[in-house]
Amino acid sequence: MVSPEPNRESAAEDAAAAPPIIVYDGDCPFCSAYVRMVRLRRTFGAIRLVDARSAEPIVSEIKAAGFDLDKGMVLILNNERYHGAECMHRIALMSTSSGLFNRITKAIFTSSRLARWLYPVLVGGRNAVLFILRRRKINAPA
């Protein structure tokens, strides 16, 4: 069981060993805004944000492992990979409650049940916005 408030000392030690990585859709305005606004740096210090549309090797590794980046972002933490709703849930557990945005997302996504229910709605919104903006999905043919 994961505690709602991570141990700040062990989180800092984990970050020193290997900073968490979040792989997200850089063409999605919601995804980009989310990763900029969530305040994980206060917990971990360093965090690596990777655009899923980039040529970074970690993107290929995630795809090869079977994760569909059109269906959710991925958090890599302590060599574990969390996708979609579970990713958002883990990020909420690790984020601070400072700022309105963080308080709202933390309140919603610290509940794994609510995260699983709400995440498909967010993915649907992402897909609609990409369509309106005439942007392709990550895995769409060129």
Image (cartoon, rainbow, N blue to C red):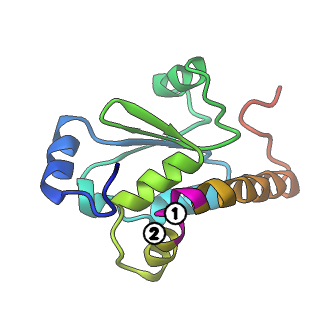
Evaluate whether residue 40 shows in this view.
yes
Which residue is drawn at the image coordinates 44% and 77% (left, top)?
A: 103
Residue 71 falls in image quadrant: top right
Dot 1 alpha-carbon crowd within 10 angstroms: few under 14, some 14 to 19, many 20 or more: many
Residue 16 falls left or right of residue 57: left
Q: Main secondary structure of the magenta part?
A: helix
**Label 2 amino acid?**
Lys
Q: Which span of residues is magenta-colored?
A: 108-113
Identify the residue at the far front of this view.
Answer: 1
Q: Along the line of sight, which residue is nearer the eye, 109 or 52?
A: 109
Question: Is residue 29 something one can see in this rendering?
Answer: no
Residue type pointed to by label 1: Phe
Q: Nearer the viewer, residue 17 or 66?
A: 66
Total tally of numbered discs in the picture: 2
Q: Hey, which residue is sitting farthest top in the picture?
A: 64
Numbered circle sitting on residue 106: 2
Where is residue 77 shown, x and y percent of the image?
Answer: 35, 39
- In this rendering, is residue 16 above or below 5? above
Question: Do tag 1 and tag 2 residues touch (Cβ < 8 Å)?
Answer: yes
Q: Is residue 112 above or below residue 105?
A: above
104 inside magenta stretch: no
Q: Secondary structure at mark 1?
A: helix
Direction bottom: furthest residue = 100
- The residue that disc 1 covers is 109
Mark sitting on residue 125? none
Q: Is residue 91 left or right of residue 41?
A: right
Disc 1 to disc 2, C-alpha distance: 5 Å
Would residue 112 be counted in the magenta stretch? yes
